[in-house]
Image (spheres, rainbow, N blue to C red):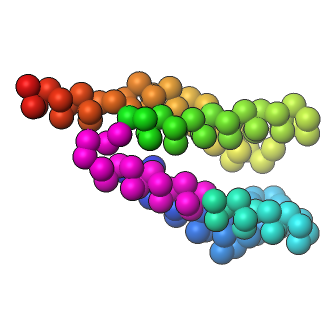
Amino acid sequence: MGDGVACVAIGVHHLVLGIASVPGEEATGATVDSRERFYNAIFIGFGLARIRTARQSPVPSTAVRLLTAVFPLGGVGRVLSLLVHGWPHWLQIPLAALELLLPPLSFWLADADERSVAAARG
């Protein structure tokens, strides 16, 4: 659930501040600002879906895996951007690493709650 809360908090931050929330991009125009706010409204929705999923008992592994699949896509997008436009602001590098390295762990742990509940039921 913590990752969902983090997504909502990050999304609200970017939705409210727009492009001013992106290091090094304060001078970008209205089109990019509009896109930043739009995508972060979707990120808030994603975070809310993660929170709702985590509050179910047992936590449904299919929903966890489906939501988790979004993160490596974001990392792939960052890699494509690096290949096309070069290195971004340094903060984007650890974000890309998280987006590419954490999903396998989440996929692996996705059914842990379902297994635990099934084992408890005997």
Depth order, front residue of 92/102? 102
Q: Residue at x 41, y 24 (%)?
A: 108
Whether residue 30 appears in magenta in the rendering, the answer is no
Is residue 61 shown above or below 122?
A: below
- Residue 63 horizontal side relative to residue 86, left or right: left
Compared to residue 91, the image places residue 29 above or below, namely below
Nearest the eye: 34 or 98: 34
Q: Which residues are magenta?
A: 43-60
Q: Is residue 10 visible?
A: no
Res 77 → quadrant: top right
Q: Residue at x 56, y 62 (%)?
A: 44
51 inside magenta stretch: yes
Q: Is residue 111 above or below residue 20?
A: above
Residue 52 pos. (x, y %)? 39, 56
Asked whether, in this view, residue 14 is left or right of residue 103, the answer is: right
Residue 73: x %, y % from top left:
67, 36
- For the stretch drawn in magenta, what is the main secondary structure? helix
- Count the numbered circles shown: 0
- Asked if residue 28 lies left or right of residue 90, the reply is right
Rendered location of residue 96, percent (x, y) = 66, 38
Q: Residue drawn at (69%, 73%), measured in percent from left and top?
A: 17
Query: Quarter of the image holding residue 80?
Result: top right
| Residue 115 makes an appearance in the image | yes
Rendered view: 15 above or below 106: below
The residue lying at 39 percent from left, 49 percent from top is 53
Position of residue 45 measured from the top left corner of the image (x, y, whole percent): 55, 60
Horizontal placement of 23 versus 114: left or right?
right
Q: Quadrant of residue 18?
A: bottom right
User: Can you say which quadrant of the picture contains the C terminus?
Assistant: top left
